[in-house]
Amino acid sequence: MPIPRRRCGHYKVLDEGQMHRVHQAVLEVLEEVGVYLEYEPALRILADCGCRVDFEKSRVFIPEHVLRKALSTAPSRFTLHGLRPEFDVKVDIDSIYTIGGSSALFVIDLDGRRRTATLQDLEDLTRLQDALKNLHIMHGIVNPQDIPQDGFDRRLFPAVMKHTARNYYSQGTGGRSIADQIEQAAVILGSTDAVRARPPFTIVLCMTSPLVQARLRLEELLACAENGIPIYVEVDAQPGATTPITLAGTLVEECANVLCGITLAQLVRPGLPCVFAIASGVLDMSTTTYSGADPRANLLHVATAQMAHYYNLPFQGGTGIDAVISDVQAGYERGMQVLANALGGTNFIHLSIGLMEQMMTASYEQCVIDDEILDAAFVMARGLEVDDESLAVDVIREVGPGGHYLAHEHTLRHFRELCWFPRLTVRDRWETFQSKGARDMRRRANDEARRILKEHHPAYIDRRTAEELDRLAVAQQQAEIARLAREGT
């Protein structure tokens, strides 16, 4: 089934005047404060294109005319490709999609144990998410701890790609990793030309707040631009810690940092698909820990969506919840987070499935529960139609006072498309609930996850290709480990 396109954006927290003031502050920061870039080739590109660069301090100052030129070539509409066309994601600044969980170090397995994540968990959790109705783009939900960590991204690539045909939201560990991932994708698609024509993966570039872009991320950015691999330029701010405690001040830093990266990408390759991205939370001043589920974090995401759209850029937002188990807290945190992003027009709701404990832990059960929460949120985000058919005056006239609509042709024609049919949610009376075993949401999710893992074994890649992909990934990781050893890093 093709991935559906949903549209929203009804919830706004900034008016036009406020967005303009944020934009003017962003211009001031870019031109007068600048951004620290830890990679001289990137600085030279920006200098050659009209930016003022202090090479001694590795700082670039971007004037408004350079920013405008870059934004004029950044597309607001493009396609993120799956391994099969039915999994393509048609991107614009109105549509809403989801991205799975990312990079947890621990899992809560189906026996209720919290333990370190393994490569097998990554494969199983990818397979589980692949079966979920509301997951559109796949991420590596865990970083396996039973493999060497240097060059880990090479091993994640086949572990994910063997079990989904969705576009893979990947990450890198420097410029070499982009070339290696292209080589792996070429094994699947048949050639590097095929990869460049329909790249089945994207790369997220996590910049550092405040106003820092690390060498490895810039290496990856330039490698993606050279090869036409779409990118998410992301900052993960914490108001009061890495950005001003005011959300407006944090907006300014986010915009300046992200727009610096997108400017560089567009100057290197005009038209490269770029997504304005954040996964920001807030600093809990009572515990000094990160909180992704704080209501202010939801406000920040909605406001940042508005600013991304102000620049005519698609927006990725979303972050982990704080709950440590699948309980009431997990439900309300995920529900508020997902609904705020859906209503606020976030184009890619990130980290929307399975992540808990400030992104440290992935839960098999929560993956299934989050899919149900997303399903309900999308019903609300869709809104309602008001036309002759939905107003149904003729039907009301026909039924008249005191009649009923249950068997009417109008009801039979529309109920499947209009009614919400949950899979986990219980609507039984007490006696029926008890007679069915009185299983709570978490246990019902456990049952459903076990069923999916037993039955869902997709074969998007043939066995011989999968084996070749695994061999290449191991060889690439070993080469990366040897290189780092030689360089003493």
Image: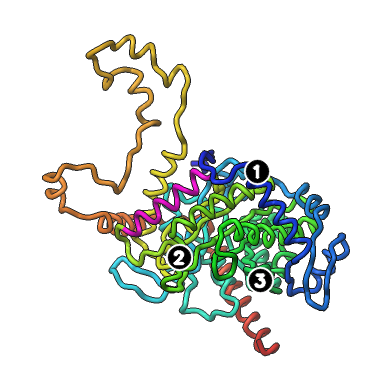
Q: Nearer the viewer, residue 255 or 70?
A: 255
Q: Residues within 10 Å of mark 1 (few under 14, many from 20)?
A: few
* Residue 444 picture location, percent across and down: 26, 54
Most prominent secondary structure in the magenta stretch? Answer: helix
Magenta region, residue range = 329-344
Q: Residue at x 47, y 51 (%)?
A: 135
Q: Nearer the viewer, residue 165 or 93?
A: 93
Inspect the image, locate mark 1, and give the three-letter code of the amino acid beneath it.
Gly
**Mark 2 or mark 1: which comes first in sequence?**
1
Residue picked out by circle 3: 177
Q: Secondary structure at mark 1?
A: helix
Q: Choose mark 3 or mark 1, whichever is in front.
A: 1
Q: Nearer the viewer, residue 449 or 488?
A: 488
Residue picked out by circle 1: 17
Res 118 label = none
* Residue 41 picture location, percent across and down: 81, 71
Res 291 label = 2
Inspect the image, locate mark 3, and give the three-letter code of the amino acid beneath it.
Ser
Distance in Å between CA atoms under marks 3 and 1: 43 Å
Q: Nearer the viewer, residue 329 or 3?
A: 329
**Mark 2 or mark 3: which comes first in sequence?**
3
Q: Residues within 10 Å of mark 3 (few under 14, many from 20)?
A: many
* Residue 381 picture location, percent across and down: 46, 40
Inspect the image, locate mark 2, and give the three-letter code of the amino acid beneath it.
Ser
Q: On the rendered image, what quadrant is the C terminus found in?
A: bottom right
